[in-house]
């Protein structure tokens, strides 16, 4: 569905060099990205600020011309065939609006039907589905400029789907949303992706979006792909492990060792300890700990994707 | 990629031409409704147009009273009053000033959303502008004309073709004005901020379009040069000369024909500029 080979985007930046002179400097926003995404896949595309996520998305949707490399979406070349491609993809930019500021949502949707030339019955059926899944009815007649961010985002999602796109690009669709709105957007996208008809490419800084929605995770940094695979593969690759946190009755004795684990932290005057599981199983480690010291409370923590990604970002930052 | 991917699905049951017309019509409707939202602005704008109409009318009539034979630049007093009051009504119809939507969208990066539609930006903005002009025609055109008719003797068209010719001329003026504004706004693709060119446009279009004074007051050679070499007199001077019947039937029709040429040229320029811009577009702000 989506093919990228050695895709690059360079921007020329002019920097001051002397009173009148300007020196040209080339910045590679996307530096040779190759990816292939199949029909019905749900792909999370993450990376730190300025990594090149949005630039990639803009090249895939035909808004920006690539500096070099090959790109094809739905078998079309995005920039020269942009208007044809527009009929087959849907795009949501979390930071921008595609709706008409002065018009109520209902009018915007009707206008989109004409712009995308969707038969009335199909349009009505899709709108009905979105209305019930995203709870649009309460603000369907409110001008877009008066909508809250969460309401607007639900409107944006609907607007991107009314023409039945084969690929949906979402650029930070949950940015700035409260917990409830985030949940609504996520469960809507999960339902949409579950049907297997729509290919979904999602960029986000909220990793909960990815954990909830995407089987495949592509991490990009400095314009290059640094990871492409499942979330489990990411954990494995970067050695993220489960850990045991225990509250003890007495401070942990000095030099205490729990076989197959590593002591990762001691807090609360030695009353709270954290062990990271290395070669040991959780059961063996817990049994060992309970046998050795007086444990009051105990919890087992799953590896945190945020930690892994933070480590990944800072690792690639190092020169 | 399989074959299915390379074809565009037909999602329209009606013919492509009729579908295009329907899309264009819907976009015109959207432009109309967007402007219809701001009723207070419409009223305030109309009031301002009328106040300035009095000012301009008295100045021009004073000029006429002192001119040799009381016909400055070949206009009678009735024709001058018509020139002023129809002009005040047309100001908001052709939208001479104040349109910075494209430049703003380029600066903020929202232009990306326009590029993601299956309609080329020039077509989309043109349709919306025609809707805006239609709203202007229905709300902003008539009140100044009525005010003028109540307080001044106006020229009544004597030829049957004047009113239809005027209608065509106004539509062409709207298209030309849109084209100019589109090109001026599009400089933001290169400059990031189009305020400079927009200021120049506001100044130039008012003076050389025939708003501040009829261009016929200038030396004849200069007037002809402006008319042929720039689209500006086609914005206001032409429709106003057509309705005031300043010239004979042949020249009256000829000026409208010149507008057709300018409308085609300026839209072609707009399309060219847009195509160039898309190749070097930088979408601002993530």
Image (cartoon, coloured by chain):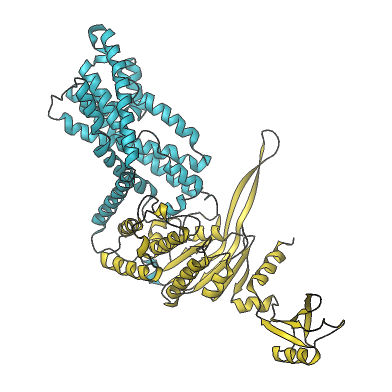
Residue A220 percent across, percent down from the top left? 61, 65
Front residue of this view, candidates A269 and A173: A269
Height in image: B270 above or below A262? above
Front residue of this view, candidates A28 and A131: A131
Name the image quarter holding residue B52. Answer: top left
Front residue of this view, candidates A289 and A79: A289
Height in image: A41 above or below B150? below
* B279 left or right of A33 in image: left
Q: What number of labels is visible?
A: 0
Residue B286 percent across, percent down from the top left? 55, 54
What residue is at 25 percent from the left and 19 percent from the top? B80
**Which part of the image, by quadrant, shows the C terminus of chain A?**
bottom right
What residue is at 45 percent from the left and 59 percent from the top? A78
What residue is at 70 percent from the left and 80 percent from the top? A241
Residue A294 visible in the displayed image: yes
Front residue of this view, candidates A147 and B113: A147
Chain A shade: yellow
Height in image: A71 above or below B179? below
Chain B shade: cyan
Outermost residue, front side: A249
* B53 left or right of A157 in image: left
Name the image quarter holding residue B222. Answer: top left
* A182 left or right of B10 in image: right
Residue A54 percent across, percent down from the top left? 54, 59
Residue A62 percent across, percent down from the top left? 46, 57
């Amino acid at each position: 569905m989506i093919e990228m080979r050695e895709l690059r985007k360079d921007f020329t930046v002019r920097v001051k060099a002397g009173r009148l002179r300007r020196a040209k400097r080339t910045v590679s926003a996307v530096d040779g990205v190759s990816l292939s995404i199949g029909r019905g896949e749900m792909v999370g595309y993450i990376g730190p600020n300025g990594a090149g996520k949005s630039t990639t998305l803009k090249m895939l949707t035909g808004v920006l011309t690539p500096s070099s490399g090959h790109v094809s979406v739905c078998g079309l070349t995005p920039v020269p065939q942009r208007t044809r491609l527009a009929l087959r993809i849907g795009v949501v930019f979390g930071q921008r609006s595609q709706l008409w500021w002065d018009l109520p949502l209902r009018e915007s949707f009707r206008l989109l039907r004409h712009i995308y030339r969707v038969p009335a019955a199909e349009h009505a059926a899709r709108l009905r589905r979105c209305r019930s899944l995203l709870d649009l009815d309460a603000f369907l007649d409110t001008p877009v400029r008066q909508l809250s961010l969460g309401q607007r985002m639900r409107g944006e999602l609907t607007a991107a789907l009314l023409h039945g796109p084969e690929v949906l690009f979402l650029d930070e669709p949950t940015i700035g949303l409260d917990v409830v709105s985030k949940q609504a957007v996520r469960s809507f996208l999960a339902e949409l992706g579950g049907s297997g008809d729509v290919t979904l490419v999602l960029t986000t800084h909220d990793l909960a979006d990815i954990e909830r929605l995407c089987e495949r995770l592509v991490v990009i940094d400095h314009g290059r792909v640094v990871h492409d695979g499942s979330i489990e593969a990411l954990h494995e690759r970067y050695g993220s492990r489960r850990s045991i946190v225990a509250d003890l009755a007495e401070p942990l004795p000095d030099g205490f060792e729990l076989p197959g684990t590593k002591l990762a932290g001691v807090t609360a005057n030695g009353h709270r300890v954290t062990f990271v599981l290395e070669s040991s199983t959780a059961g063996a480690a817990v049994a060992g700990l309970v046998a050795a010291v007086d444990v009051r409370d105990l919890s087992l923590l799953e590896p945190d994707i945020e930690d892994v990604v933070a480590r990944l970002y800072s690792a690639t930052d190092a020169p | 990629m399989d074959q299915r991917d390379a074809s565009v699905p037909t999602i329209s049951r009606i013919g492509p031409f009729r579908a295009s017309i329907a899309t264009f019509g819907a976009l015109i409707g959207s432009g109309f409704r967007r402007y219809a939202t701001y009723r207070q602005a419409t009223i305030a704008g109309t009031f301002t147009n009328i106040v300035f109409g009095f000012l301009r009318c008295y100045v021009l009539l004073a000029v006429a009273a002192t001119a040799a034979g009381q016909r400055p630049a070949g206009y009678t007093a009735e024709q001058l009053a018509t020139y002023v009051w129809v002009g005040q009504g047309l100001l908001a119809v052709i939208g001479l000033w104040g349109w910075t939507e494209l430049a703003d969208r380029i600066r903020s990066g929202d232009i990306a959303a326009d590029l993601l539609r299956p309609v080329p930006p020039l077509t989309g903005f043109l349709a919306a502008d025609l809707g805006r002009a239609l709203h202007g025609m229905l709300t902003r055109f008539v009140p100044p004309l009525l005010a003028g008719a109540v307080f001044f003797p106006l020229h009544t068209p004597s030829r049957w073709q004047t009113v239809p010719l005027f209608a065509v001329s106004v539509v062409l003026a709207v298209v030309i004005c849109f084209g100019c504004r589109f090109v001026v706004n599009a400089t933001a693709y290169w400059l990031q901020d189009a305020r400079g060119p927009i200021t120049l446009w506001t100044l130039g279009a008012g003076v050389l379009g025939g708003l501040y004074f009829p261009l016929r007051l200038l030396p004849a050679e200069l007037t002809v040069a402006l008319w042929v070499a720039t689209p500006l007199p086609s914005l206001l001077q032409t429709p106003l000369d057509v309705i005031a019947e300043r010239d004979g039937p042949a020249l009256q029709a000829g000026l409208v024909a010149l507008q057709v040429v300018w409308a085609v040229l300026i839209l072609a320029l707009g399309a060219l500029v847009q195509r160039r811009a898309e190749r070097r577009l930088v979408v601002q702000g993530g």
